[in-house]
Image (cartoon, coloured by chain):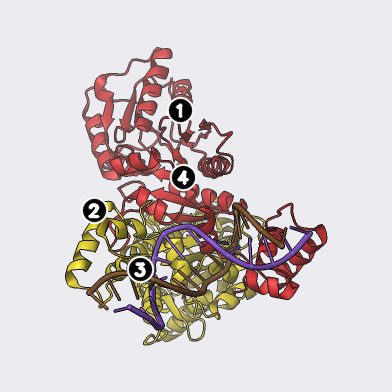
Chain colours: A yellow, B red, C brown, D purple
Amino acid sequence: MIKITDIAAACGVSRATVSKALNGAPDVSAETAKRIRETARKMGYHPNAAARALKVGRSYNIGVLFSDRTGGGISHEYFSQILESVKAEAERRGYDITFISQNLGAMHMDYYEHAKYRSCDGVVIASADFQDPAIIRLATSEIPTVTLDYSFDSRTSILSDNVRGMEALVRFVYEKGHRRIAFIHGEMTTVTQKRLASFKKTCALLGISVPADYIRPAYYHDPRSSGLATRELLALSERPTCIFYPDDLSFLGGMTELEKHGISVPDGMSVVGYDGILLSQVLRPRLTTYRQGAEAMGREASRSLIEEIEHRDTWLPQQILVEGELLEGSTVREID
Amino acid sequence: MIKITDIAAACGVSRATVSKALNGAPDVSAETAKRIRETARKMGYHPNAAARALKVGRSYNIGVLFSDRTGGGISHEYFSQILESVKAEAERRGYDITFISQNLGAMHMDYYEHAKYRSCDGVVIASADFQDPAIIRLATSEIPTVTLDYSFDSRTSILSDNVRGMEALVRFVYEKGHRRIAFIHGEMTTVTQKRLASFKKTCALLGISVPADYIRPAYYHDPRSSGLATRELLALSERPTCIFYPDDLSFLGGMTELEKHGISVPDGMSVVGYDGILLSQVLRPRLTTYRQGAEAMGREASRSLIEEIEHRDTWLPQQILVEGELLEGSTVREID
DNA sequence: TTGTATGCGTTATCAT
DNA sequence: ATGATAACGCATACAA
């Protein structure tokens, strides 16, 4: 691999001059700078990232953290879309991305140590248990971080607009004439709290009363637990006319359960999902759901993180709300 | 971040001794070595990856390449599963992974240069246009590489067993009584060639003749083109009784087209997919398809790449065939 | 405007 | 068995 020394030799100048020219320092004559840059390009020069990182403490490398815990894996469509757009935007701005994990091989290190080990300029925390002390250590460290779907104090976060999303769904269902609406929710994260609160608030606003046993717990991305919750809802003396599922995938558990009871969607029961993954739109009937703006979220995460990295002096933490989009589908029937 | 100098000071020895002790050099007394290792652990020492990479030319970092071209994106389930298992196995062995791309920010570099720029110890080429000169440059360079679903000469490759997979599907369909089988294929890659050849060969073996117009071109992961091909097949004077689709997702295009013609699956038409993604198994009826061993492929890719990196002297290129699994589903009906 | 010298954290060579 | 020193490639403070 060609290095600065080679260019210096080729141009008959010192290594320092080459370095300056390449980095656009003001104290090098325009012509030498031009000559140097041209030969560098001709010779196919690229700086050695490790050497540069060692010297200036900047790696042009940002970490991406997906906790391996259930639900946050890369192969979930929502997260893989986020990953893809985080990557694309970072690359567009000249940054590489590296996954941050714990316990690399024999070394026992936590997320913070891993990020330091790789000299990451910043970290996108895309999916994690935000109560985990290791996550908290990272998010409260001197390393710039951006979190998705969770806010740490004085840190930037990218938030899917769960409040508005849930409100849109409730209103849609309401306008179709539904008044008995059940809600199956995932684990009690802050996201869940927002969705649940928005659900209740919108219902109250519209004058819908929600019996306590219409609210059922389950797990995200786990069709089985949602199937169970569905069964319980069907056993109630007064069945709901519409069921909200924690996410699109979970609905499938409900679907199976409904089939068992000979109930068809939407004639026998109306249903609503959340996420708007590909699957939801290829199912027949197409699922009524709310598509989260995954691509925009990933892009914004990279953008704001790099903004912070490159302008730490003028930077202020923000909470960026990313809107999604209601997908009407055909799983909510009109009732009179 | 704590460094070797700190440990040296704490232990009252030189940096050289610390380095030796930490790297298990023989010329340091057992007791000092032990003392040094313990304080290092207590102080939470981890080597600086950049400094080490600069010095020894090993980064403990492997590149992963997903070409951005249509079809190979990370958000396709097959590839995201591969990515996830490549990552898991690499981390288990102490390696980080970084995405390799072209044109990082303003820098114009190709894949090979990018890998060098980051001092990657090796690269997993997970999805790419293998005719692309930039890919060929990388795969024929001195950097260890492993390719998925394609073989370069004298390089290790991980191959999904397309021949056996297609054979299994044809035999399954044959046993259900089908004799008029159509085949819609994706772009003419080597994978496609293998599937097509295996399809034809197995048909021949079983005494099935396949009219030329039963073989139709389309694109992978593109429901529309498969829908078009389906329409053409339906227009034939002698319709097939079963259609093979390029992949599970593409089948959806066919499904829509069949619905338009009032044809139900599997009563009016039997169909078969390929890949075995989650979607295929939540559709009703469940799709008959062949699940590729994505997780095993990623794991083997990391394992063999790191094997090569760490034992370059004794290492030999291999072609590793990973078997999949027939998923029976219910989209192939029994005919008499 | 250009060049010299130094150090980033680590490992390897060579003395001691 | 341990330590002094140089070098990896780069960027910068300072000297020329």
Q: Nearer the viewer, mark 4 or mark 2?
A: 2
Q: Amino acid at mark 4?
A: Ile
Q: Position of residue A96 (x, y in %)?
A: 41, 62
Q: Find residue B277 and name its label.
A: 4
Dot 4: within a 10 Å radius of its alpha carbon, few (fewer than 14), some, or many (20 or more) residues? many
Q: Secondary structure at mark 1?
A: helix
Q: Position of residue A175 (x, y in %)?
A: 34, 74
* Quarter placement of the C terminus of chain B: top left
Residue A270 appears in which quarter of the rendering? Answer: bottom left
Q: Which residue is mark 3?
A: A299
Q: Amino acid at mark 1?
A: Leu
Q: Which residue is mark 2?
A: A42
Estimate the spatial distance between the alpha carbons at disc 3 and disc 4, rounded to whole Å. Answer: 27 Å
**Is the C-beta separation of discs 3 and 4 under 8 Å?**
no
Q: Secondary structure at mark 4?
A: loop
Estimate the spatial distance between the alpha carbons at disc 4 and disc 2, rounded to whole Å. Answer: 46 Å
Q: Nearer the viewer, mark 1 or mark 3?
A: 3
Q: Amino acid at mark 2?
A: Lys
Q: Chain of mark 4?
A: B
| Residue located 21% across and 29% down the image | B235
Q: Secondary structure at mark 3?
A: helix
Query: Same chain for marks 2 and 1?
Result: no
Estimate the spatial distance between the alpha carbons at disc 4 and disc 1, rounded to whole Å. Answer: 16 Å
Q: Amino acid at mark 3?
A: Arg
Q: Which residue is mark 1?
A: B169
